[in-house]
Amino acid sequence: MATAADHEGAQTPARSCGAGEVDALTLPGVQVHERTGRGGSGRGGAGAPGGAQVNGHMLPSSQELAATLPVARLLVDVVPAHLDRPFEYLVPRVLDDLVRPGVRVKVRFAGQEVTGYVLERVPEAEHGGRLSPIRRVIGADAVLTPALASLAEALAASQAGTRADVLRLAIPPRHARAEKACPPEARVPAEEGDEPPTDVAQGPADVDPGPWGAYPAGPSFLRRLQAGESPAAAWSALPIDAGGWPQALAAAAEATLASGRGAVIVVPDHRDVQRVDVALTARLGAGRHVRLTADQGPQARYTAWLSLLRGHVRCVVGTRAAAFAPVRDPGLWAWWDDGDDLHAEPRAPYAHVRDVLLTRAEQAGGAVLTGGFARSVAVQQLVATGRLREIVPEPATRRRLCARVHVAGQGQEEERDGPAVRAHLPSSGWRAAREALTRGPVLVQVPRRGYLPSLSCAHCRERARCEACHGPLAVGAAHGAPTCATCGLESRQWACPECGSRNLRRSTVGARRTAEELGRAFPGVPVRTSGSGEVLDHVPPTPSLVIATPGAEPVVEGGYAAGLLLDAWAALDRPTLDAGEEALRRWLTAAALVRGRDRGGVVVLAGAPTHDRLPPVEALVRWAPEWFADRELTERTALRLPPTVWTARLSGPQGALGDALAALPAVGLPPSVEHIGPVLLDQSPHNSVAMISGATLGSVPPTPEAERPAHVLLRADPADAAAATAALSRWRRLRSVRKDGGGVSVRVGAHELGG
């Protein structure tokens, strides 16, 4: 068993200690040393006159240690991968009652005071060297619960990460004021006749199914939750006319609480949190749940987290920070819109909310529910393997409640309208909007924000780029000059490097330019925009045009009368593996806000290629997200693409990547693992001019080939996934021991194959 003192001696030179500072105490049966006084290493034994202090208390002899279990094993919050293991510390007698498994403490490590979590207390140390004492305890709560400790270990192993990285995401920083304001731990009834916890439902025997009544398997799912069972389901949600997905999640939480268990609900962003929060309050009443998001203030977040830890409430809704919520007796793990990239953690160990909740369900039990208007390929794989069962509406119900979808340019429209069918706002879209504005608001989804976010040569269609930094040119306002989106340099004298033309044309139209064009096309109609800078939550049900970027569509009571999905090609043209999947998800999310066809709702998809039948377009027309996900899964299985195979992405300088690939076989990487790449990420010219706010800084020297950023994709069969991940973990620890930075990051499960 390693100690912090050993690490300190290996990493830092001998140092002096301040008067009264204790680096080690004498423990019977363990060879330890003590350093006191100024200058030099310690003289004298533990009983030397004058003693020492810890937390202001004198420690004159070994009798000042805890009488029983005087050694604590801690997990220390440090970055290096090779330090992801328990360290032993001494427990002073004055802290004996406070040092419990799970509490947060402060210890000295490598010459610094760092945070640690107590894993356990033992009677004797395994290490035969000197031990340092715990300096103080941070709060009385055992914040590292056994469930969180087990989760951190499992996620770190599956993502080739460290437990410290997981715990930084799982446990918020302590807030003393919130700790004092939050009531003490709730009392658990021990005898018959005691009152049950306040968060257990006292309502009728059967929970009102609400929106679940529109699904054949919906009421059965609720009954199983209320009976204390643990079903696992993939739910294809109906549009707004079916009652709303927030109300359905609230009903599932109510049924779970009625069984005496807790519920965790994770949604992509704060607007979704607000919608589910309102639905939960209406279902459960005030004070029966908490919100937990990363953007809450420190006090509000820690108060909510403590309320769950201390057992005051058992239901939480939040963004990906809520996936780690310490809910007692969990019975439901639910997340909405699996394909939203906000569910993917951008920090190490890069775990997806889906992975976190599924791991917790495996360890602690409980039902699993993932829902959305679309279905991701990863969820479809869980359905195909039998881990999740489908909850889908009847085809007749779906046809009635979903809007009719029309693809502009199909049929005889081109003969009738000519080139207008390929306009930014085609004739069919204009006619649908004009008719719908007599009945209510119209939603217009635009894939790009800004005014003209992309330009190209008017002659050869080559994309227009900045002469200085090779960034894309864009126009930010009407009559504005072309400006580089990267360095801000105006390019009034731009010339196409391919054909020499100086004329530009727009490649894509942003939300602001669309609002300007529609304002002229429909004079007198209010135009509202929702996107970057200002996102609207709701709009009134009066006739208006609502222009929104994907993910920023506001809700309207009763649904939109029509929806226009413009520039469909831009969503399909992304150079990523999930381009079609993401395009369909964005379209269905917007189309679900439109009234059903029985109330005249219509959705027009404009800008989609009409020369071929594209699966995402066909899935939108048929409202068949399950069909599309199953088709994608079949194709990826045949091509050995994620998520049907294990993948890991190594990113960093090209030279360091080469060294990493050469070292991986020595740490046990299975021979069956394939290497795809390296792929250079920086394709801009080497000899360029650096620009900041339009000011020339001078020529930039060419980047050495070994330092050019690149990435390598590792691919293996699922049977080799555990061995491959373990090899990456060993390689990270070995590199950490050798202090070989290298700049190489590891991301297990990365599905992005593009640059």
Image (cartoon, rainbow, N blue to C red):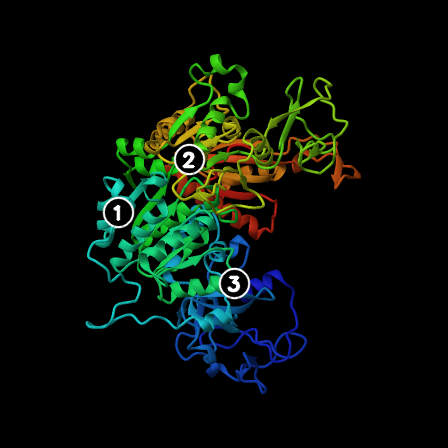
Q: Please say whether residue 599 is visible from this viewpoint.
A: yes
| 3 or 1: tag closer to the N-terminus | 1
Q: Is 455 displayed left or right of 45 in the figure?
A: right
Mark number displayed over residue 231:
1
In the picture, measured across the screen, residue 222 lies left or right of residue 497, that is: left
Q: Is residue 341 above or below residue 678?
A: below
Query: Label 3, label 2: how many angstroms apart (C-alpha)?
Result: 45 Å
Q: Earlier in the sequence, mark 3 or mark 2?
A: 3
Measured as percent of width and height from the top left, residue 201 is found at: 26, 61
Secondary-structure class at tag 2? loop
- The earlier-in-sequence mark between 2 and 1 is 1
The residue carrying mark 3 is 298
Q: Which residue is mark 2?
A: 439
Q: Which SS class for mark 3?
A: helix
Mark nearest the camera among 3 and 2 is 2
| Whole-percent x, y for residue 508 in the image | 59, 28
Eye-nearest disc, 3 or 1: 3
Quadrant of the image occupied by residue 378 = top left
Say which of 413 and 316 sits in front: 413
